[in-house]
Amino acid sequence: MGDSMNNMIEVKDLCKQYKKFKAIDNISFTLQKGKTLAFLGLNGAGKSTTLNILSTLLNQSSGSVKIANYNLNNNNINIKKNIGVVFQKNTLDLDFTVYQNLYQRSYLYFQNHNQCISEINRICVLLNITHLLKKPLKNCSGGQIRIIQIARALVHSPKLLILDEPTQGLDPSARKLVWDSIIKIQKQTNLTIFYSTHYMEEVKYADEICCINDGKIIVHDELKTVMNKFSKQKLIIEDNNITKTFSFDNPKSAINELNKHPSLTNFWYIDILLDELFHQISKEF
């Protein structure tokens, strides 16, 4: 999607093979600068393998990857300067304060005390966590810890944020807290975001959806396009003791159908459940 100069990620014919097993099978996709992409797939589909390659943690078997116009393997140092990664598991030190955790990471990039303090203050203001700086990490909530992980990933002002199921294991209120923070910083900094998720309701935060199944990309398109193609709303009506079910692409069509049944006694309008979306896409392919 888009021309090469505007792409933050370019993946072409990417493969990762373990003996006879192909974890990633010849996938290609792009992501433009400033856009957000939701990377969807069932367990074992190839999500984590792809994220690990993009994060420079795993070498591909074949194919090419370019991030921020740098070729993977040839320019990994420059790629690491341009990406921030948040993994599923907490990699922060629970015995450190929030400030100590952030300072430890920032010093790896800047090796200058004053610059570290400046960048920590900048990211904490953006994410509204300045009040947590002196707090031991072990006393923070699950949602706060995840936001602190994001702050650590962004302390060096990368252009791309990679999130591996960022709200895994969090309750709904904590998930909302995390996503409110991600959306806020994305809007303020034009950050490019690539995230995997198991929570289908989190798809709505993406500009684009990319679905992987058995190591192959089966869909990659704008969110609206995917929803229009694969999602259907249902209208169930009771008319003269007869129950009828209709499927529609939009609420306006459902209203038109309702107007055709002046004697109906009851009706139900059911919007698409996002949990069903991936299942419908998988059936298509």
Image (cartoon, helix red, strand yellow):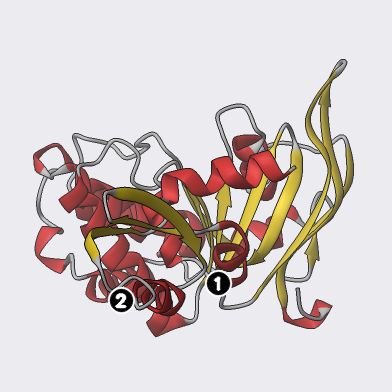
Q: Based on the displayed image, in which of its 4 quarters is residue 82 positioned?
A: bottom right
Looking at the picture, how far across and down is residue 64, in whole percent?
A: 87, 52
* 248 relative to 201, above or below: below
Task: Name the residue at 46% across, 76% down.
Answer: 253
Identify the secondary structure beneath mark 2.
helix
Looking at the picture, how far across and down is residue 172, in whole percent?
A: 20, 48
Labels 2 & 1 near each other (Cβ < 8 A): no
Looking at the picture, how far across and down is residue 207, in whole percent?
A: 54, 71
Looking at the picture, how far across and down is residue 73, in whole percent?
A: 81, 49
In the visual, does 25 lie left or right of 99? right
Upstream in sequence: badge 2 or badge 1? 2
Q: Nearer the viewer, residue 188 or 148?
A: 188
* Residue bearing mark 1: 224
Q: Amino acid at mark 2?
A: Arg
Can residue 50 be seen from the camera position used here? Answer: no
Q: Nearer the viewer, residue 210 or 31?
A: 210
* 60 relative to 75, above or below: above
In the visual, does 274 lie left or right of 5? left
Q: Amino acid at mark 1?
A: Lys
* Residue bearing mark 2: 122
Q: Quadrant of the C terminus?
A: top right
Q: Based on the displayed image, in which of its 4 quarters is residue 257 positioned?
A: bottom left
Q: Nearer the viewer, residue 102 or 219?
A: 219
Can residue 7 be seen from the camera position used here? Answer: yes
**Label disc, if present, on residue 103 of the rendered structure:** none
Task: Name the residue at 8% across, 40% down.
Answer: 139
Q: Quadrant of the N terminus?
A: bottom right
- CA–CA distance between discs 2 and 1? 34 Å
Task: Name the residue at 37% across, 37% down.
Answer: 91
Identify the secondary structure beneath mark 1.
helix
Residue lying at the far front in this picture: please name it: 240
Task: Name the residue at 35% across, 72% down.
Answer: 258
